Amino acid sequence: MRLEELKKGLWGYKKEGVFQYITAQEEAFSQRLMEKDAQAEREAASAQKRIAELEQEVSTLRRELETLRGRQDMISSALLDARSCAEAMKAESQAQEAAARQTVQQKMQEDLACLEGCRKQIEELRRSIRAALQEMEKKTEELAQQAKTLSEDTSEANLSLFR
């Protein structure tokens, strides 16, 4: 009903028409209010559903974050362990290198001492051989001289027999 449709009386609008109009308006407003309440309930239910989904997603993301943090901690720990292991291996290899260098140095000194001993023996042998050769040279000269003397003596003596 519209306001223009209200019947007029002598003193203004008729009460019955006004009451009908107010009742119609009240029903229309009540209907709209109920529709709005139903819409609000549907929106609230949708919002609650969305809130539940988001809370589930947050929970899932928190678990995933905890897992990732645990992995990050494990990676950090592994890196620190690897770094300390590398430093220990480096120190051990340096110690082994120093020990090997010392062993090689000691062996080289022993070999040099052995070579020096061999050189002295060779020098001594050379002197001995030289002295022996000189001795033999003297004896050879003496023997050659004796042979020459004997040869001269023998030649003259042999010839005198045949004369």
Image: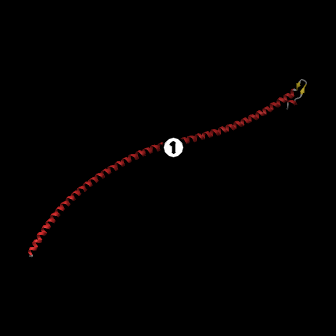
Foreground residue, 44 or 66?
Answer: 66
Q: Quadrant of the C terminus?
A: bottom left
The furthest residue to the bottom = 162
Q: Which amino acid, mark 1?
A: Ile
Foreground residue, 153 or 67?
Answer: 153
Snapshot quadrant of residue 9:
top right
Report the number of discs: 1
Left or right: where does residue 61 sit relative to residue 4?
left
Which residue is located at x 30 percent, y 52 percent? 112
Snapshot quadrant of residue 134:
bottom left
Which residue is located at x 80 percent, y 33 percent? 28
Q: Percent from the top left, x then y, of residue 85? A: 44, 44
Which residue is located at x 8 percent, y 74 percent? 161
Foreground residue, 84 or 103?
Answer: 103
The furthest residue to the front = 163
Identify residue for label 1: 75
Left or right: where does residue 100 sit relative to residue 124?
right
Snapshot quadrant of residue 67:
top right
Disc 1 element: helix
Which residue is located at x 10 percent, y 74 percent? 159
Q: Percent from the top left, x then y, of residue 95? A: 38, 46
Q: Percent from the top left, x then y, of residue 59? A: 60, 39
Task: Decide: few, some or many residues near mark 1? Use Cα within 10 Å; few <14, some 14-19, many ≥20.
Answer: few
Left or right: where does residue 59 sit relative to residue 155?
right
The furthest residue to the top = 11
